[in-house]
Amino acid sequence: MKWKVGDTTITKLEEIVYPEFPDVIPAATPDVVKKVKWLFPHFVTAEGVLSLSVHSLIVDTPGATLIVDTCIGNDRDRDPFEVMHMLSTSYMEDMVSAGYHPDGVDYVLCTHLHLDHVGWNTKLVDGAWVPTFPNADYLMSKQDLEFWGSIDANAQDDFMQLQRKVFEDSLQPVLDAGLAKPVEGAAEVCEGVSLVPTPGHTPGHVSVQIESAGETALITGDFIHHPIQFNDPNLVSPFDVDNDAAVATRHRVFGEYADSPTLIIGTHFAGPTAGKLVRDGDTYRLDV
Ligand SMILES: [Zn+2]
């Protein structure tokens, strides 16, 4: 799947789709989902269960090739998170088939440092984790690096323990290779691509703004996980570090982009993945 934004092309590179992933927003039960008719059939199952896609977005500008978020990755011990444990997908082969070679990627942009966004930062070669994109600058939030890089070794929380493994196999090798470029706040990456702070899901979470020839797009990252949150920005995810900040970010960003020509591209939206954000009574809807 591809979108044109002026002279820039954005390509969706799918790693895995979970047809049913209700845990991401537990309050969005089938009864709640069924009231939001426009979610059918793309974003939920016929029974009203949330679907979730894990994909990268390759941004090809006239001057640079960037990859936004690198999914879960193969060969990773993600126990006890079984649905993401020891994957073996054709992600890298699919990237090459789409016309992109890892050596040709100029920038890797991490919206945040969760396991499903940094996996292919590295790959396993002869038993060692090495950067997948050897010629790229890997941009990531300084705040997130500090937060996820200092998890207590004795943390009782399974998810925090899992994120320690993620840091070790998917981030530390990038830091060791000198390819990580920590950024603070809003930042221009290259002509037509910039990072905009959308905190809450993680402390330093960023979205990616793309601009070319008068057209614009926004790659969300996880300040929104599922399109049902356009209908109700107050629906929260247990994966948010700070639910209140995430809710505030959604209200602010939705208000800013509603009824604008900006293409909104969801990092976890299934099916068509992108659309225009429109006001719908006192709430919002994604027009695909
Ligand atoms: Zn995610």
Image (tube, helix red, strand yellow):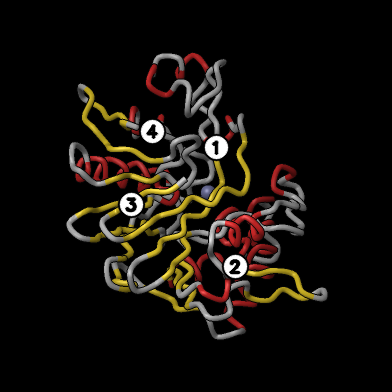
Judge whether 154 appears above or below 278 on screen.
below
The answer to which image quadrant residue 119 occupies is: bottom right
Q: Earlier in the sequence, mark 2 or mark 4?
A: 2
Q: Secondary structure at mark 3?
A: strand
Task: Look at mark 3 in the image and give the residue it sits on.
Answer: 4
Query: Looking at the picture, how far across and down is residue 203, in whole percent?
Result: 42, 59
Query: Looking at the picture, how far across and down is residue 29, in whole percent?
Result: 52, 21
User: Closer to us: mark 3 or mark 2?
Assistant: 3
Q: Earlier in the sequence, mark 3 or mark 4?
A: 3
User: Closer to us: mark 3 or mark 4?
Assistant: 3
Separation of disc 3 and disc 1 at Cα? 23 Å
Separation of disc 3 and disc 4 at Cα? 25 Å
Task: Look at mark 1 in the image and give the residue it sits on.
Answer: 52
Separation of disc 3 and disc 2 at Cα? 25 Å
Please give left or right for residue 85 compared with residue 271 in the image.
right
User: Closer to us: mark 3 or mark 1?
Assistant: 3
Callout 4 crowding tier (Cα within 10 Å): few <14, some 14–19, many ≥20: many
Under mark 1, the amino acid is Leu
Instruction: Tell me: is circle 2 under 8 Å from ligand 1.
Output: no
Q: Looking at the rendered structure, which numbered label has been put on residue 229?
A: 4
Task: Look at mark 2 in the image and give the residue it sits on.
Answer: 121
Q: Nearer the viewer, residue 262 or 197?
A: 262
Separation of disc 4 and disc 1 at Cα? 13 Å
Q: Secondary structure at mark 2?
A: helix
Residue, x 48% and y 50% (percent of image)?
12
**Viewport quadrant of the C terminus:** top left
Whether residue 161 is visible to the viewer of this picture, yes or no, is no
Under mark 4, the amino acid is Gln
Residue, x 59% and y 53% (percent of image)?
116
User: Closer to us: mark 4 or mark 1?
Assistant: 1
